[in-house]
Amino acid sequence: MAEEANSLEYTPTWVVAVVCFVIVLMSLLAERALHKLGKLLQKKKQEALFQALQKLKEELMLLGFISLLLTVTQNAISRICIPPHLANVMLPCKKEIESSNQEEHYQHNKRHLLSASKNAALCVHGGKVQLFSLEALHQLHIFIFVLAVVHVIFCASTMVLGGARIRQWKTWEKSLQNSKPEDQTKPVHEHHHHLFLEIHAKGYWRKAAVVSWLISFFKHFLGSITKSDYIALRQGFITEHCPHLPHFDFHEYILRTLEIDFKKIVGISWYLWLFVVMFLLLNVEGWHTYFWLAFLPLGVLLVVGSKLEHIITCMAQEAEVKMQNKEVKPSDAHFWFHKPVIILHLIHFILFQNSFEIAFFFWIWCTYGFRSCIMEKLGYIIPRLIMGLIVQVLCSYSTLPLYALVSQMGSNYKRSMFSTHMQSALGRWAQSDKCTTESSQTAPQEMLIPQPTLQSVSQLP
């Protein structure tokens, strides 16, 4: 009878209308805010950020679909029954009921479930328990909502911190762009180039593997990129990939690259969802999984940051050996498995795992309280929160901009080398070239349009 009184059939219409109005209003406001933000990005011609926003909306839609799927199937899930001994395996919190009074607890639980819901009563009559209760499903809904909110906030903070760091390099780019014409013919400003080699390549001990990695480790925390590093890498990139563009705006290119990489970071890949499932599986009482897992993103971050700094050192030492040409030579050989994109996947994992942990913390706090057994002791909570803050700031402000710069030292350049206008011109040119080639299959070979070169691209309007 109590269950019928709580159904929609016996709920006042004004309550239903008010609740629906508030939910619809909040949803429309959120949707309009994202739409206005997308229009603003398009107006400012921030196509990469606009695509990142679209990717974020897709992830939010996926989270909403998961929540909707749980809502629709909750009755079917609550009807699934399992033996009682399986319900006591791998619990996140230890039950207070001991085995001595297990029968008494079972009878009490039976009376409680009988008064709670019909589905639970059906399981109890069969000597079993529910696989997933309605209350647990409701709490899982809250977790998905908290995860979505924290993920959006962390993505925004990542872009703000990373963009702020890269914009600090603008003064270095202006100093090169505003230099005298005769200085532009030099491979790089002699003072900064000499300083770059002096810091990274001079000295016997700097060439030792252990010392080199230790220096790279500490440099990641203190001044990950100096002006000498920026100028040396910039000149090496221009000499290798665009020698016909002496006035190439390398800083603007790095910003566009960061925006494109950000589009990949905001997504939640399948292996990240697999990680969430594995974490929920291993969150067993007494294992302190939540505490030990907090060290995972920090450890991966330190390895990635040290690797990026060590790549700069390797390129400087390689340039120092080649006395006839001391410019930095971009190459994929310095990256893991010769693939720079692996580092971006690791950064993606670091940021998502960190946001997931913070979301899990707030979910436990809001749902069960600060003194919950899942929350564990205060001595475990404070280190996790401190490490989460360190990882977010260090990865967003230092590691991600460092990757945006060092990843350009690969063998191939990215399409973000060209501005949005030039990319559109290249797309139109390639489309017209394709149509012309298809229509002239029988034409003489000398009449076919030649393939584009970087030199011809530099002459586009």
Image (cartoon, rainbow, N blue to C red):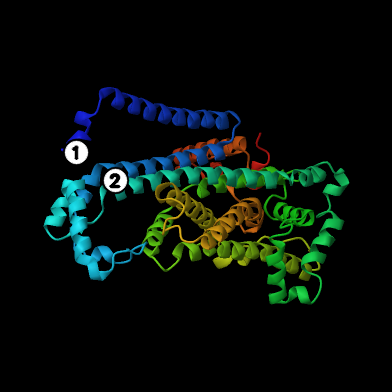
Q: Nearer the viewer, residue 447 or 206?
A: 206
Residue appearing at x 43%, y 49% in the figure = 363
Q: Quadrant of the C terminus?
A: top right
Dot 2 crowding, Cα within 10 Å, few <14, some 14–19, many 20+: some
Q: Amino acid at mark 2?
A: Leu
- Compared across the picture, whether 112 is left or right of 340 comes to left
Which callout, 2 or 1, points to the residue nearer the camera? Answer: 1
Above or below residue 299? Residue 445 is: above
- Compared across the picture, whether 317 is left or right of 116 comes to right
Above or below residue 442? Residue 5 is: above
Q: Nearer the viewer, residue 154 or 243?
A: 154
Residue bearing mark 2: 70
Q: Secondary structure at mark 2?
A: helix
Q: Secondary structure at mark 1?
A: helix
Q: Position of residue 282 (x, y in %)?
A: 39, 65
Q: Amino acid at mark 1?
A: Ala
Above or below residue 48? Residue 315 is: below
Residue bearing mark 1: 2
